[in-house]
């Protein structure tokens, strides 16, 4: 038994803190109150510091890292992660496991390992056996499904393939997957016709599981992209989660209010819709996301062929110039595969291109070709006023969307949750501490049906974070992204101490 005595209890509901004590027995919360018998207990004297539920990251790409015991999230207080986002999951593999790995490795940071899980049952069993630092839940990635069935080919599937796609999703949801995700800016999922998506959303709706989407646009076509997803939710009855909502690029910042108006109206009309976002102005993903989708048809081999063909390359350059909402000075290289090119990491494409005497887009294309498309970027997309509006919105949960890279990762991987409590809540005052905790505990737990977690409540799992509200912070920065958080005193998972080690 462990007694946390004299804590500022922040229960996850959004209610104001209450001074009191909490007793843990056999991995569960047994008692909450002012006066709890401390006999035969290990006593942790809290001295008025904050005690909250463990934090829940519902938009994670740590599918493989949770199996490896990586501590980037643990040291921030994260005790549960929902992986399989943006259409990338580590299952199902089927007979096309090589295609699945080629597709998912850059986002999941597979490092070339021959991982393979037949379906959700195998992955979740393995994850819950090997993951010692968090509770793992997983979505089923649409891009992974497509690669497992038809490889990297774009366009409509054959009827038998579409049936197989639907069957694999149903099997995974029945086996315990938390929902279904799409990455509609990533090939081949970007080419899926509406009816394919509607069929899969109906499967998720019948299972009462979440449909989380990385939409087809967050830039110039943000509003049509939201309309597309709301239409799918209305037609299928699914529970819609808009992933990492933002208006990307200065020319699109004024579209955010209209986007929120659409979501608010849909919510009033009875559509079960919500969104999430990370507390940073920049995002991070693969550099090839900036390319036109047709250029990615057939996977990496075909992309490299197109980059080597002058006429095709010229067409790609023209389309990128028209469609890219950011400036090249907003795009920083976060990771490359080759050690000999690590000097470009942390630098923006515009500066690198100027030094090389190249056009920035040409330089980016050359880098993709030389690295066989294994290039990660950090892109500055957002305005501070828009970020504040998102983080303080009642439909918002806060996420990391952290991606591992060979180079310099986005600081959100190491700093999101402590930064929310420190910089966003205490320093800027955008959210009260109780509301900030709510957005990373009870709200995401309810959204993804994560039972028995996310609250300080009797009988709930003793996933707990003890932190100092006056010093908690996420000092990880773009220049020093792996700097550990401060002010996190103790973290428990199922009543077992995982911080400090």
Image (cartoon, rainbow, N blue to C red):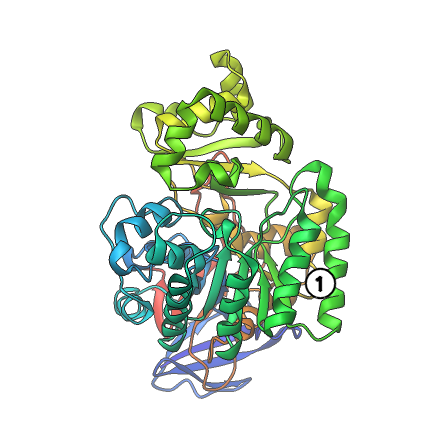
When the figure is inspected, residue 186 is found, relative to residue 32, above or below; the finding is: above
Which residue shows up at 71% across the image and 41% down it?
252
Q: Is residue 454 left or right of residue 150?
A: right
Quadrant for the C terminus in the image: bottom left
Q: Residues within 10 Å of mark 1 (few under 14, many from 20)?
A: many
In the image, is residue 151 above or below residue 270? above
Based on the displayed image, in which of its 4 quarters is residue 258 positioned? Answer: bottom right
Which of the 4 quarters of the picture holds residue 497? Answer: bottom left
Task: Please state the horizontal and vertical placement of residue 409, each as a whole percent of the image.
Answer: 44, 40
Quick check: can you spot residue 396? no
**501 or 450: which is nearer to us?**
450
Q: Which residue is mark 1?
A: 263
- The residue drawn where x is 40% and y is 73% is 170
User: Which quarter of the picture shows residue 140?
Assistant: bottom left
Q: Is residue 131 visible?
A: yes
Indicate the secondary structure of the residue bearing disc 1: helix
Instruction: Report x, y in % for residue 328.
Output: 58, 27
Q: Quadrant of the N terminus?
A: bottom left
In the image, 68 versus 133, the foreground residue is 68
- Judge by depth and name the residue closer to the eye, 463 or 68: 68
Residue situated in front as seen by the camera: 345 or 74: 345
């Amino acid at each position: 038994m462990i007694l946390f005595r004299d804590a500022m209890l922040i229960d996850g509901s959004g209610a104001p803190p209450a001074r009191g004590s909490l007793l843990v027995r056999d991995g569960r919360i047994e008692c909450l109150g002012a006066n709890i018998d401390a006999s035969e207990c290990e006593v942790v004297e809290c001295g008025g510091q904050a005690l909250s539920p463990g934090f829940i990251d519902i938009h994670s790409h740590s599918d493989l890292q949770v199996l490896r015991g990586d501590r980037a999230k643990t040291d921030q207080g994260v005790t549960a992660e929902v992986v399989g986002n943006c259409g990338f999951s580590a299952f199902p593999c089927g007979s096309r496991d090589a295609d699945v790995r080629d597709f998912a490795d850059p986002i999941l940071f597979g490092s070339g390992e021959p991982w393979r899980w037949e379906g959700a049952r195998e992955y979740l069993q393995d994850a819950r056996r090997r993951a010692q630092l968090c509770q793992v839940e997983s979505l089923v990635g649409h891009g992974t499904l497509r690669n497992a069935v038809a490889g990297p080919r774009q366009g409509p599937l054959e009827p038998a393939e579409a049936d197989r796609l639907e069957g694999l999703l149903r099997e995974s949801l029945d086996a315990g997957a938390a929902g279904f995700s799409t990455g509609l800016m990533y090939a081949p999922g970007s080419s899926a016709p509406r009816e394919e998506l509607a069929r899969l959303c109906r499967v998720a709706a019948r299972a009462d599981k979440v449909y989380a989407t990385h939409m087809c646009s967050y830039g110039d076509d943000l509003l049509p992209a939201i309309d597309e997803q709301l239409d799918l939710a209305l037609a299928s009855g699914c529970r819609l989660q808009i992933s990492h909502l933002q208006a990307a690029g200065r020319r699109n910042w004024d579209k955010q209010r209209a986007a929120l108006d659409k979501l608010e109206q849909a919510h009033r009309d009875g559509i079960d819709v919500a969104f999430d976002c990370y507390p940073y102005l920049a995002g991070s993903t693969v550099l090839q996301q900036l390319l036109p989708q047709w250029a990615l048809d057939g996977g990496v081999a075909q992309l490299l062929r197109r980059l080597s063909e002058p006429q095709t390359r010229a067409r790609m350059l023209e389309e990128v110039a028209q469609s890219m909402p950011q400036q090249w000075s907003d795009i920083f290289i976060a990771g490359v595969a080759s050690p000999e090119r690590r000097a470009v990491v942390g630098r923006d494409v515009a500066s690198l291109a100027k030094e090389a005497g190249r056009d920035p887009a040409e330089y980016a294309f050359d880098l993709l070709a030389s690295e066989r498309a294994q290039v990660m970027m950090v892109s500055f997309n957002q305005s501070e006023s828009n970020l504040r509006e998102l983080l303080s919105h009642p439909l918002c949960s806060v996420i990391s969307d952290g991606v591992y890279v060979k180079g310099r990762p986005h600081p959100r991987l190491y700093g999101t949750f402590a930064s929310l409590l420190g910089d966003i809540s205490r320093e800027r005052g955008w959210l009260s501490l109780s509301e900030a905790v709510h957005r990373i505990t009870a709200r995401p737990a309810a959204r993804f049906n994560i039972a028995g977690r996310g609250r300080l409540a009797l009988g709930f799992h003793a996933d707990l974070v003890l932190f100092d509200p006056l010093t908690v912070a996420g000092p990880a920065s773009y220049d020093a992204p792996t700097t550990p958080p401060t002010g996190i005193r103790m973290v428990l998972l199922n009543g077992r101490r995982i911080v400090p080690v």
